[in-house]
Amino acid sequence: MKNVRDCWCIQIDITNACEKKCSNCTHLVKCSKPWKMDVNTFVKAIESLDGFPNVVGIIGGNPMLHPNLFEMIGYMQFKVPRENRGIWISTYGNDGRIEGVIKEVFTEKHIYFNDHNKPNWHQPLLVASKDLIPDPVERDRYIRNCWLAELWSPSITPNGCYRCEVMGAMDTALKFNLGLPIEKGWWKRDLCDFEQQVQAFCHRCGLCVPMERRLDADQLDDFTETNKDLVVPERSKPYDMSEYDSHKIVNWFPCEYRVKPEKPIGLAISVGYGECLSKVLPYNMRHLEKAFVVTTPTDTKTKEACDKYPNIEVIETDLFYRYGAKFNKGAAVELATWLLPKDKWCLIFDADVMLPADCFILERLEKNCIYGTPRAMVYTDEELEKAIKWRNFDCDGLEVKDLGPIGAFQLFNTSANVLNVRPWYGINYNNASWCDNVFQFKWHPNMRKVLPINILHLGDRHNWVGAVEGTFPRPSTPQALVNEHEPLTDVPVEKVLMDVWEELKRLGKYPMWG
C-alpha cells in the first residue's frame, strides 16, 4: 500500500447524490442518507492539497447534482493548474452550456464521463474480507496489496481525509468519524497515520479479495454477515461463500471494470529457456497484446512453449553467434525492435521472469520514461510454488534485487525522445551482460523509474550466454565466460546493424521504422 503523497490522484467527494443505483457502488449510495459538501469545506479541501503534484479530482455520486458545483469549479480553477484538475461525472445535465464549461475548465484527459450506457462490472464491496478469509495473517496480505489502494485514489469528504475513497464512503455510512483533519499538508503523512482507518474499514471491505463481479445494471449489492446492517434488503443479495477459494482465482483484473486498458507488445529472448518460458508465459501473456520471442532455429522447446499462444510470433535467427560471439543478445533484441509500431508501449522481459497479476496501467505512465521493477529471486520449485499462491506473489523470505530498468523488465514507449537514433540496444557485445544497460542509459537518470511491484526471477541472474536446457533451477554461467562490457573485437556497430537489416530482409519482415 503506497503513501498518499505517491498516489496519482486525490478526490474531493462533494456528494453522494446520484441518479443511478448501480450494483456494488464504491460510494455506498444506497447505504447512507443524501449529503453534500458545503463550499467552505470544499475551499478548505483545496487549500489542504496545496503543493500536491498530481491530479486533484471532483467526484460523487454525480457532482453535476451538487447545487454549488460551479462555484466550487471556479475556486478550483483559481487554485489548481488546469493539467492537474479532474472531474468524474455521469451526465452533463439538461443545460447544453454546462458541457462547454466543463471542457474549458478541465483537460480532455481528466474529464471522466461514464453515463453507464455500456456494461460496467463492479466487484462486491460489502462482501467483507474478514468473512471470506478468516485467517488474519492471510487477510492482511490481501489488504496491504489492495489494487484499489495501489491504483485508485485517497479522498476528502465532509468528515475528513481518508487513505481510500471507499474508507470515506464507509465512514459516512457507519459514522465512525475516523477522517483525519482537513488541514494543509495532510497528504504528506505516512501510512501509519491511516492505520486506524485500515483496521476499521479494510476488514469490512471486499475489494482487496479476488471474486466475481456483478453487472451494474443488476442494481444489487452483494453482502456478507458483517455488513448486513448496511444494505437495503430489497436491493441486495447474500454472497454465496460455500465454494469460495481465493487461491483459485488467478485471472482477476478488477481495474478492468469498464473498458479493457491498452496492453504493451512483449519482446523476449529465449535460447535454451523453453522450460522456463512455459512456466512464465501463462502469467505474462495476460498483460500483453502480443509478443515477439527471438530464438535460434534449433531451439525446439522454446518454439513448443510459444505454439500455445496465437498472439506470439517466433523469430528464428543466428545473429546471437556471428563474429564468434558467445551470445550477442543485443543484436537479436535490436532485430525485433524494428517490428514494433511507433507510439506503442513495449515490454522487454527475460524468458525466466514472471509478472504479477496487478502489474501496470499504461495510461498512468510517462511516454518519455523507461520503467523497471525489483526482482524476487526464486531458486527452488518449493519457493516458486509458495510465491505463486498469491496473485501478486508472496515474496517473504526471497532475496529482492532492485537494479532499475535492466533487461529483465524494461517497459518503454517507442515514441520516447531518446529513441530517435539507431541502434537502440548494445549490438556488438560478446555476451548479454551489458547490452540492456546501453539501452536504459539512453534515458536520463531522472527518467528511469521503478514500478512498485515485484516480479519473480526463476534461477540465477547470471545467464549471459544463453542457457542449457534442463530442469529448473539452472546453474549460472561459469564466471570464466562472463566478462562484463566485453565488446566484439574489430566489429563496428555499423556492421552489426547492417546484419540486422539483412536479417529482416531474409525473414521477409518489413520494418515499422524507416
Image (cartoon, rainbow, N blue to C red):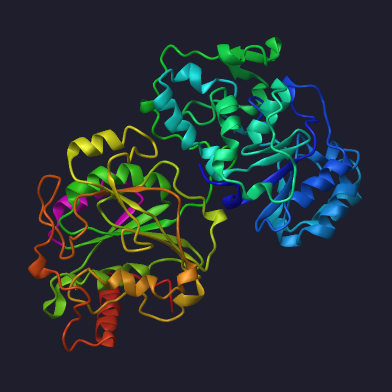
Q: In this view, does 174 lie to the left or right of 149?
A: right
Indicate left or right for 419 with 87 as reference. left
Q: Residue 264 location, x and y as percent?
A: 44, 56
Could you tell me residue 306's position as x and y percent? Answer: 26, 49
- Identity of the residue drawn at 29% across and 73% down: 504
Give yes or no for residue 302 being in the magenta stretch: yes
Q: Is residue 136 above or below residue 297?
A: above
Magenta segment boundaries in residue numbering = 297-313
Instruction: Specify whether 446 is left or right of 374.
Output: right
**Quadrant where the image shows the C terminus:** bottom left
* Residue 476 horizontal/vertical position (percent): 13, 57
Figure quadrant of residue 388: top left
Task: Measuring from the top left, give residue 121's x and y in whole percent.
Answer: 59, 31
Residue closer to the observer: 348 or 140? 140
Residue, x 53% and y 65% (percent of image)?
Answer: 367
**Residue 252 falls in image quadrant:** top left
Residue 216 vertical position relative to residue 220 in the rendered view, above or below: below
Find out whether residue 381 is within the magenta segment: no
